[in-house]
Amino acid sequence: MTAPYRIVAVSGSLHEPSKTTALVRAIADAVAERAPAEVTVVELTAVGPALAGALRREELPADVEAQLVAIEQADLLIVGSPVYRASFTGLFKHLFDFIGQYALVGKPVLLAATGGGERHALIIEHQLRPLFAFFQALTLPIGVYASTTDFDGYVVASELLRERIAVAAERSLPLVGYATTRPVEVLAG
């Protein structure tokens, strides 16, 4: 038996409870239903206060460092942010400012976002995808966007959203399997 996939879901929401957190958890659960997996959820509501005052990684407390290591060592990253002023949250970006520049090379990343309406869906293409392209991560060609109407409170309620989550989970696994079998050589510079 192979080791379970290490799935790390990152919620860029600044609120708890959160539709974004509910979405990334639902995606992680959908992947875990299809393959053996250990799921870790990183929530900005928990780590954000320690990030806010830090300028360098070595200034972070041990529990936040452990979250960064989990992100860097994941077999699959699921990252989501609410749309905030036409982009992801600033603290979400600050979290990824602490990730090693080459730590995500070739790592499969499933992008997700939440917003008040469908007109915000392009955050995935115009904000999140370029961020992870910088890291040379393997962003999955499918992303999952959810609007307020897709939830009942903080629970995924839309059948269409559940179907999009299922498709994303199905399409992510071959890439995760491929990425975990190949060592990645990093050329700095």
Image (cartoon, rainbow, N blue to C red):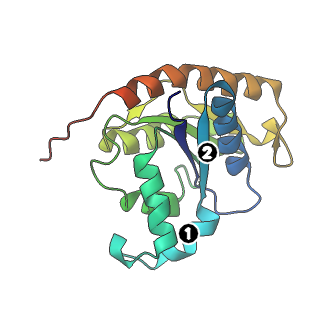
- Where, by quadrant of the figure, is residue 57 drawn? bottom left
| Residue at the image point whose x is 35% and y is 44% from the top | 104
- Residue 39's tag is 2
Kindly tell me whether residue 89 is visible in this rendering: yes
Q: Position of residue 184 (x, y in %)?
A: 26, 35
Tag 2: residue type? Val
Query: Of the residues tagged 2 and 1, which is closer to the observer?
Result: 2
| Residue at the image point whose x is 56% and y is 68% from the top | 47
| Residue at the image point whose x is 55% and y is 41% from the top | 7
- 147 shown above or below 33: below
Tag 1: residue type? Gly
Left or right of 59, for residue 11: right
Q: Disc 2 versus disc 1: distance between alpha carbons?
A: 20 Å
**Mark closer to the chain start, 2 or 1:** 2
Residue denoted by label 1: 48
Label 2: state its secondary structure: strand
